Image (cartoon, rainbow, N blue to C red):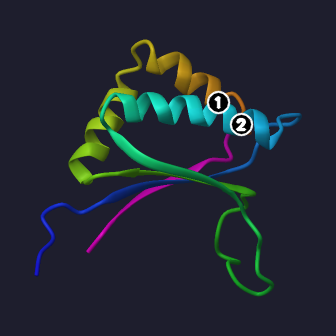
């Protein structure tokens, strides 16, 4: 049976910039997420620290942190992507404030959806 409302998640794997604490990143990420939620795009988020398992995950890129933003469906995720990509205020400043806390070139993103 096909699910017409496939929840979607934007996954981000990354390293924090030198000198940035997890608390500093979490504060900036939370403000960014809350804006996306208030705009009607996102529904939930989480930030986690990676704990590598010996012998597993070797082909993964190096990253220490993971963040996820959940959307109601793929249409909401695409609309959010387009909104952020337009780079207009206020999301421009919120996105840049969060990204400034991430080590340049360390981020990897992908979207997953329910099947």
Which quarter of the figure has residue 30?
top right
The label on residue 25 is: 2
Are the residues tagged 1 and 2 within 8 Å (C-beta)? Answer: yes
The label on residue 100 is: none
Residue 82 is left or right of residue 107, and the answer is left
Question: Which sits in the foreground, 40 or 68?
Answer: 40
Which quarter of the figure has residue 8?
bottom left
Residue 4, horizontal then vertical, whole percent: 12, 64
Residue at the image position 43 percent from the left and 12 percent from the top:
89
Look at mark 1 in the image and give the residue it sits on: 28
Does residue 105 lie above or below 19 as drawn?
Answer: below
Q: Quadrant of the C terminus?
A: bottom left
Tell me the magenta residue range. Answer: 104-115
Residue 58, horizontal then vertical, whole percent: 71, 78
Residue at the image position 75 percent from the left and 57 percent from the top:
64
Task: State the SS at label 1.
Answer: helix
Question: Which sits in the foreground, 25 or 105?
Answer: 25
On whether residue 63 falls in the magenta region, the answer is: no
Question: Which sits in the foreground, 81 or 33?
Answer: 33
Seen as rendered, the residue at the extreme bottom is 55
On whether residue 112 falls in the magenta region, the answer is: yes
Residue 14 is left or right of residue 42, and the answer is right
Asked whether residue 104 is in view, the answer is no
């Amino acid at each position: 049976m096909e699910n017409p409302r496939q929840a979607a998640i934007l996954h981000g794997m990354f390293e924090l910039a030198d000198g940035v604490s997890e608390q500093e990143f979490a504060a900036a990420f939370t403000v960014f997420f809350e804006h996306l939620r208030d705009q009607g795009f996102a529904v939930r988020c989480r930030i986690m620290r990676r704990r590598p398992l010996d012998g597993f995950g070797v082909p993964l890129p190096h990253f220490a942190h993971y963040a996820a933003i959940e959307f109601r469906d793929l249409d909401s995720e695409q609309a959010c992507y387009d909104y952020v990509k337009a780079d207009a205020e206020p999301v421009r400043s919120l996105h840049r404030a969060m990204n400034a806390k991430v080590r340049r070139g360390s981020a990897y993103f992908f979207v997953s959806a329910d099947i």
